[in-house]
Structures are given as structure tokens and as C-alpha cells.
Image (cartoon, rainbow, N blue to C red):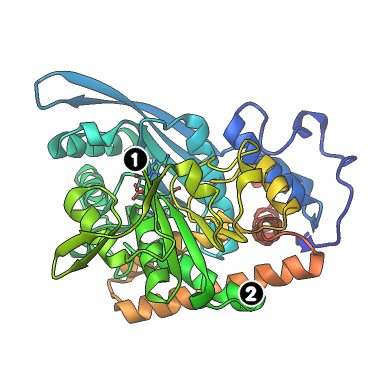
């Protein structure tokens, strides 16, 4: 049976068997069970088979490893690591690898869950996966970081592959680390295997535009959405939380397009300049000093401009038109959602708003555009990289960005149409859209997996 979108139904008396009738996914982990609440909402609007729902209740496979690393001083440290493949019905698992002291299995499973819906929403031939290591990479030397990255691949090599599960960058990992990981996997397999990792350096088979793809995709989403509300860049103020790969680039793209970016922040705190920040100067200064400062630079001579230093909590509560959380999960919760004054939120980070905050923001009339749509540019260009690696034929930046723009705009319009037709918020519409594709694939695959013997 093909899944199809329907008007709201009552799912409280669903005949899913009792062992499976808990909220999606299982209740036993907080971040993951909170992620599942968005699905519950979407399920009211979609006629999807109970088998498919049952399959989406749990991650398909989870690998926990411990990675021993010889440190520069001769000592040995052992780091916990994870790789989770949530679902691979629509294609090989796909998802980034995060290095952060706060990485837990619950977080990695939630990120893999979001990847599953993101890939389906963007109609990419991938399932959802994610990986991570519990480590503060800022405390490691470059050589230690390389040994850790290669050790991680040694530990998970049997679990990944070009047609099995493909790695990519995430928080505190970058193209250099992806290059080491691809090289290590190729050493283990005794053949160059570019397609097992995306986000690699160009010289090792990376794609044009991958570094900026998450932000570029988010920019196309914002540009596609705002005309629907009759909003013009020149009249629009923006605050961006998180000044890394995704956040710094989206801030600069919006600045270049004429938006007034008034505040940005990183893990150390933020800056607020009501008259607007000069983003190329702020990025230049951050690259030089690793600190965010409100500066204006001419020929690399920078002077400080009038501004206030603010905390991350203050940034989230600024009276701006657009708020872009681009750091980590759970930044807007029931504790601070009522302080948010922005009219629009575009989630560039994964999971920056929890489900309790969703309801508060909705009641305040704030338009939230969800992570699985807004930040999908990264995985979309990862898909382009994988295709180019398999074909050995490489596209230029213009071709990449044109294909990315078409993909993002197509899925924004389809999601918008669902939200208008069913009168639901954009997050619910995005889950309905992704779930519809996942349901069709799960049903099309048949029942062999349940009757192996
Ligand atoms: P990054 O490591 O390049 O940057 C993270 C930034 O967040 C840094 O500036 C850091 O200082 C800041 N930060 C950390 N803790 C913070 C805090 N408590 N408050 C404010 N800022 C804080 O990571 P990234 O790749 O830019 O990823 C950021 C978010 O975007 C993550 O949620 C990630 O999952 C998501 N994302 C990234 C990609 C990608 O391709 N890189 C793709 C999709 C989604």
C-alpha cells in the first residue's frame, strides 16, 4: 500500500500491537524521544502502514566503540565513539561525524533519526546515519586528532562503506579530517574508496561548494520563503547563533544579499551592533584571532565599531526579524521560548528547538522553518560529491549551486503546499512529506526482513 497524505485523523486508537504502541521512537532516551514527538504530530496526517511505523520506531543498527589513542607525550587515552544507522531503506546510511565533549549515544541516535527524514524530504537516495566521538578536539594536537580519526575508522570500518553508510563533517570536524578518514578506509580495503566519505578536500575527490553547502542551501530556503510574507532583505534584521562552518557562512551570505545582520555569537558569547555588522570583517578577524569581534577592516587593518557584547541567551531573545540558530541542539526550550521575539526562525543547527518550545513559539505566531529542510544543503551537496566520485566526472561550482538551488526550492515549495493545504506548521509539513516517501519505500520493500527463516 502506498502512503498518502490525509486530513487530520485520530491515531490514539491505532491498532499497532501493544509492544509497539509507545511514542515514536522509544521512550528510553530523552533527545530521541523528544525528536519522535514531531513524528507523532505528522502521523495524524498521513496514511502510512503500521509495519512502516513499527520499523521507524528504533534505529536499525548501533555501534559503540572505544578508540585507544597514543598521545604526543607517550600516554594512552581511550575515547568513546559511536556510529548509528537509523534506516537504510531508501539507500545507504548518510550522516556526519561529530567531535564534541557532550557527544552521547542518545544524541547520535537523534541526529541519525533527523538524517533519515532529511534525506527523504530532499528525495536523496540515502537513509539516515550519524557518528560521533566524545572528545574535546580543542585539547588535541593535530597529530593526535589524526590518530583519533584514523582509529575511529579502524573501529567502524566493517560498519560503513560506499553502498552501506557514508561519513561527512559535522560539529568540530572538517574536510581535513574527512580526508584522513577516507584515506584510512582505503588503506584497510587496499583500494582507493572515495565515496565512503563526503566533505573531503577537493584534491582528494571533494566537491566544489561542499564547504559552504549547508549555509548556501539555507540561504536558498530563506530567499524562497520570505517573498511569501512580502519581506525584503533591506528591511530585515538577523541574529545568528554559532559562528562555525554553517553559521559564519549564512551570516555572510545574508549580509551580501543586503540583510542587516545585527548579532552573531560563538561558544564564548556574542556581539550586537544595532546598525549592522560588516560580516567579511568579522570573519576575517575571527580567522586571525579565533575570537568574534565587532570590527570593520580595510586592507587588513581592523578597527572596532560600536557594539555591545551579549550572552548567547541574550542573542536568542533579541528583537530581530530573523533568528538563525546554527550551533547545537536544545538552545530554545520551554525555559526561554517565551523570551524569543524574532518573527522567523530558520534552524540551521540540528534540533536547536525542543518540542515543548515548538508549541510556545507556535502560540506566539513565530514562523519556524525546520532543520530537516533548512540545513539539508549540506547532505544534498554530499550526495553530489558521492555521485561525482562514482562517475569520476566533476562539476564546477556554478553547476553545483544551480542543482542545489533547484533541489532546495523544489522541496520548499512542496513542503509549503502541504502546510497550506493541511493548515499545519512547516515542521509538521516537512515530516509529513519525508514520512510519505519513507512509508512508500518501506512498503515497497515487502516483508522479507520479517520472515528471514
Ligand atoms: P562548527 O563546529 O563549524 O561550528 C559550531 C559553532 O557553534 C562554533 O562557532 C562554536 O563556537 C559554536 N558554538 C558551540 N557551542 C555553542 C553555544 N553553546 N552557543 C553558541 N555557539 C556555540 O559546526 P557546524 O558544522 O557549523 O555545525 C553547526 C550546526 O549545524 C550543528 O547543529 C550541525 O549538526 C549543523 N549542520 C552542519 C552541517 C555541515 O555540513 N557542517 C550540515 C547540516 C547541519
| Residue 259 x, y percent position in the rendering | 45, 72
**As drawn, is 147 to the left or to the right of 398?**
left
- Is the distance from the Cβ of mark 1 to the nearest ligand 1 atom less than 8 Å? yes
**Residue extending farthest left:** 73
For the point 48% across and 49% down, the residue is: 315
Residue beneath disc 1: 268
- Quick one: label 1, few (<14), some, or many (20+) residues within 10 Å? few
Say which mark, if any, is on residue 443. Answer: none
For the point 28% across and 53% down, the residue is: 293
**As drawn, is 296 to the left or to the right of 336?**
left
| Residue 405 x, y percent position in the rendering | 47, 76
Q: Nearer the viewer, mark 1 or mark 2?
A: 1
Residue beneath disc 2: 413
Report helix, strand or loop for mark 2.
helix
Q: Is residue 453 visible?
A: no
The quadrant where residue 426 appears: bottom right
- Quick one: label 2, few (<14), some, or many (20+) residues within 10 Å? some
For the point 89% across and 48% down, the residue is: 10
Q: Nearer the viewer, residue 165 or 310?
A: 310
Amino acid at each position: 500500500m502506498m502512503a498518502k497524505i490525509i486530513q487530520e485523523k485520530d491515531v490514539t486508537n491505532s491498532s499497532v500491537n501493544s509492544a509497539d504502541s509507545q511514542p515514536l521512537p522509544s521512550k528510553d532516551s530523552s533527545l530521541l524521544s523528544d525528536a519522535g514527538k514531531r513524528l507523532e504530530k505528522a502521523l495524524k496526517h498521513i496514511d502510512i502502514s503500521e509495519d512502516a511505523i513499527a520499523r521507524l520506531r528504533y534505529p536499525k543498527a548501533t555501534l559503540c566503540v572505544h578508540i585507544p589513542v597514543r598521545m604526543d607525550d607517550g600516554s594512552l587515552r581511550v575515547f568513546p565513539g559511536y556510529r548509528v544507522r537509523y534506516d537504510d531503506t531508501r539507500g545507504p546510511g548518510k550522516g556526519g561525524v561529530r567531535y564534541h565533549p557532550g557527544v552521547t549515544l542518545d544524541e547520535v541516535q537523534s541526529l541519525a533519526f533527523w538524517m533519515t527524514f532529511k534525506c527523504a524530504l530532499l528525495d536523496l537516495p540515502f537513509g539516515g546515519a550519524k557518528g560521533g566521538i566524545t572528545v574535546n578536539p580543542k585539547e588535541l594536537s593535530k597529530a593526535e586528532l589524526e590518530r583519533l580519526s584514523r582509529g575511529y575508522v579502524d573501529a567502524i570500518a566493517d560498519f560503513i562503506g560506499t553502498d552501506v553508510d557514508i561519513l561527512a563533517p559535522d560539529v568540530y570536524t572538517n574536510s581535513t579530517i574527512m580526508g584522513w578518514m577516507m584515506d584510512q578506509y582505503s588503506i584497510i580495503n587496499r583500494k582507493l574508496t572515495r565515496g565512503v566519505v563526503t566533505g573531503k578536500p577537493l584534491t582528494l575527490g571533494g566537491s566544489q561548494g561542499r564547504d559552504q553547502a549547508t549555509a548556501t542551501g539555507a540561504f536558498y530556503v530563506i530567499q524562497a520563503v520570505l517573498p511569501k510574507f512580502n519581506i525584503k532583505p533591506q528591511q530585515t534584521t538577523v541574529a545568528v547563533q554559532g559562528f562555525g562552518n554553517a553559521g559564519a557562512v549564512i551570516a555572510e551570505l545574508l549580509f551580501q544579499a543586503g540583510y542587516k545582520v545585527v548579532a552573531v555569537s560563538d561558544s564564548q558569547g556574542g556581539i550586537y551592533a544595532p546598525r549592522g555588522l560588516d560580516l567579511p570583517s568579522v570573519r576575517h578577524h575571527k580567522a586571525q584571532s579565533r575570537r568574534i569581534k565587532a570590527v570593520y577592516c580595510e586592507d587588513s587593518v581592523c578597527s572596532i565599531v560600536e557594539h555591545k557584547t551579549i550572552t548567547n541567551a541574550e542573542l536568542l531573545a533579541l528583537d530581530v526579524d530573523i533568528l538563525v540558530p546554527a550551533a547545537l541542539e536544545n538552545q530554545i526550550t520551554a525555559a526561554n521560548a517565551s523570551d524569543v521575539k524574532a518573527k522567523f526562525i530558520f534552524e540551521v543547527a540540528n534540533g536547536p528547538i525542543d518540542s515543548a518550545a515548538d508549541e510556545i513559539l507556535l502560540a506566539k505566531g513565530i514562523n519556524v522553518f525546520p532543520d530537516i529542510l533548512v540545513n539539508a544543503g549540506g547532505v544534498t551537496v554530499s550526495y553530489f560529491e558521492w555521485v561525482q566520485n562514482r562517475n569520476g566526472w566533476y562539476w564546477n561550482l556554478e553547476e553545483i549551486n544551480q542543482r542545489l538551488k533547484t533541489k532546495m526550492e523544489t522541496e520548499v515549495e512542496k513542503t509549503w503546499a502541504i502546510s497550506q493545504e493541511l493548515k499545519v506548521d512547516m515542521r509538521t509539513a516537512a515530516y509529513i512529506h519525508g514520512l510519505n516517501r519513507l512509508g512508500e519505500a518501506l512498503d515497497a520493500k515487502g516483508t522479507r526482513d520479517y520472515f528471514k527463516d
